Amino acid sequence: MVTLLGFIWIAGIQRFLVGQIGMGLLYFFTGGFCWIGTIVDLVNYKEIALEFNRKMAYESYHIAKFSVK
């Protein structure tokens, strides 16, 4: 669980991995909003992962769709 790693080591690492670079930098420089944001991410990690997976599936579908034509 990368969010837990962000809580004890580098705040924001979970946001970098899902492609939210701006939020990752904000978390990094503010200590995960003084760890409050990181705790919220610990609670909502499934939603963050689901959103990222949906985005990647959508992009993969469109790449596959264009390569068939």
Image (spheres, helix red, strand yellow):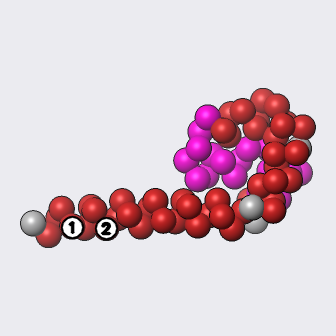
Relative to 25, say whether 61 is above or below.
Answer: below
Relative to 11, say whether 4 is above or below.
Answer: below
Please check the rendered image and state whether residue 7 is part of the magenta-colored stretch, yes or no: yes
Q: Which residue is mark 2?
A: 61
Using a 10 Å C-alpha cutoff, classify the residue at mark 2 as few (fewer than 14 neighbours), some (14 to 19) or many (20 or more): few
- Residue 39 vs residue 17, the one in the foreground: 39
Q: With 5 as the anchor, is 52 left or right in this view?
A: left
Q: With 31 as the anchor, is 18 left or right in this view?
A: left
Give me the residue at 54% from left, 59% from top.
52
Looking at the rendered structure, which numbered label has been put on residue 65? 1
For the record, the magenta segment spans 3-22
Give me the residue at 58% from left, 67% from top.
50
Considering the numbered disc 2 on the image, is that residue within a helix, a strand or a loop? helix
Kindly identify the amino acid type of the residue bearing the numbered disc 1. Answer: Lys
Relative to 40, say whether 53 is above or below.
Answer: below
Image coordinates of residue 57 in percent, x first then y, are: 41, 67
